[in-house]
Image (spheres, grey):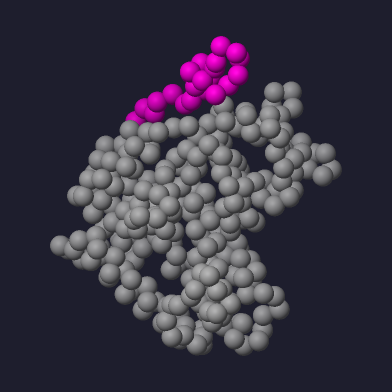
């Protein structure tokens, strides 16, 4: 994956390049890049987007260090092999349970209780998360009652809940970018289901308690102590950005996705079908020369 900020992405002399404000060119081997992460201050030409699509490289528009995912082009690089594998795992009840158990083990660093259903494991995880919130609130001296917020009335929540919501949104942005770049479907979840980003929530939760939740309570403590010199949401985003960079989380997410899905026990596709390209153009070209 390549992050680009404050630069123009274009194609010059057939090569993919990023050009900064001083005119310095940085060549990017687009054929070997899984995903371009366009941070604030970056622009990309139509020709560059076209070349990325031909190479099967995902282009995403993100916040600084991935704390937001605004949009993504051609998710999965026009491949369906991983998507089909993910769907097979989710539809097979035994495979799904094995994946959920693996997620539990990664999240809590211990084996999931035996003879528990997906729903029961979901309930156990919820209890452990609530307990972790209480412990972190005590550790940082934060007033804490329970997780409570109204998406339609952001300011009605207390400082700690606003920090947690902002931190979780940052992690979801980074996780969704990784899920899309790896060629999986955000909506096909295992522990979480029925939402457009169910799989994003599954993957984000693997690292949530280790990364953004402690940062949220640290910022909440500063806010309650009157030591915060900026809006809560911005302070949380900056803290999460630094945490992502320090821990190298982005580089760990995609291998983590592969690891938990392999636990499902179904064979992984080995030779993906050819990416859409000339065949797609042939099928959608009309007699009048216009593309479908």
Say which residue appears at 28% left-offset and 41% top-offset: 88
Q: Is residue 256 visible?
A: no
Say which residue appears at 62% left-offset and 29% top-offset: 50
Could you say where residue 105 lies in the image, as x and y percent from the top left? 30, 61
Specify whether 29 is left or right of 205. right
Could you say where residue 213 lies in the image, as x and y percent from the top left? 48, 71
Is the N terminus in the top left, top right, bottom left or bottom right quadrant? Answer: top right
Is the C terminus in the top left, top right, bottom left or bottom right quadrant? Answer: top right
Q: Residue furthest right?
A: 22
Could you say where residue 111 lies in the image, as x and y percent from the top left? 25, 63
Dominant secondary-structure state across the stretch colored magenta: loop
Could you say where residue 62 lies in the image, as x and y percent from the top left? 61, 51
Say which residue appears at 49% left-offset and 51% top-offset: 176
Say which residue appears at 37% left-offset and 33% top-offset: 81
Q: How many marks?
A: 0
Q: What's the magenta region?
A: 270-292
Q: Is residue 187 visible?
A: yes
Q: Nearer the viewer, residue 147 or 229?
A: 147
Q: Residue furthest front?
A: 288
Q: Look at the picture and state if 139 lies above or below 186.
A: below
Please check the rendered image and state whether residue 273 is part of the magenta-colored stretch, yes or no: yes
Residue 266 placement: quadrant? top left
Q: Look at the picture and state if 231 lies above or below 17.
A: below
Q: Residue furthest top?
A: 287
């Amino acid at each position: 994956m390549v992050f680009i900020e404050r630069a123009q992405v274009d194609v010059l002399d057939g090569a993919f390049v990023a050009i900064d404000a001083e005119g310095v060119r940085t060549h990017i081997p687009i054929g070997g890049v899984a995903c371009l992460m366009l941070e604030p201050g970056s622009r990309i030409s139509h020709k560059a987007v076209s070349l990325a699509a031909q190479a099967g490289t995902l282009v995403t528009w993100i916040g600084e260090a991935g704390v937001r995912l605004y949009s993504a082009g051609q998710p999965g690089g026009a491949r369906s092999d991983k998507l089909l594998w993910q769907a097979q795992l989710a539809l097979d009840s035994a495979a799904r349970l094995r994946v959920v158990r693996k997620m539990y083990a990664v999240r809590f660093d211990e084996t999931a209780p035996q003879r528990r259903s997906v729903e029961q494991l979901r309930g156990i995880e919820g209890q452990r998360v609530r307990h972790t919130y209480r412990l972190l609130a005590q550790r940082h001296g934060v007033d804490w009652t329970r997780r409570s917020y109204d998406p339609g009335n952001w300011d009605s929540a207390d400082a700690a809940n606003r920090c947690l919501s902002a931190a979780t949104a940052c992690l979801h942005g980074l996780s969704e970018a990784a899920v899309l770049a790896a060629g999986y479907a955000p909506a096909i979840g295992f522990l979480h289901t029925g939402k457009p980003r169910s799989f994003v929530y599954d993957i984000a939760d693997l690292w949530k308690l280790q990364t953004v939740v402690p940062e949220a309570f640290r910022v909440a403590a500063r806010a309650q102590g009157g030591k915060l010199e900026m809006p809560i949401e911005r302070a949380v985003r900056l803290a999460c950005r630094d945490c992502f960079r320090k821990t190298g989380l982005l580089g760990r997410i995609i291998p983590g996705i592969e690891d938990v899905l392999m636990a499902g026990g179904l064979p992984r596709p080995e030779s993906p079908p050819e990416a859409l390209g000339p065949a797609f153009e042939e099928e959608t070209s009309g007699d009048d020369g216009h593309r479908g």
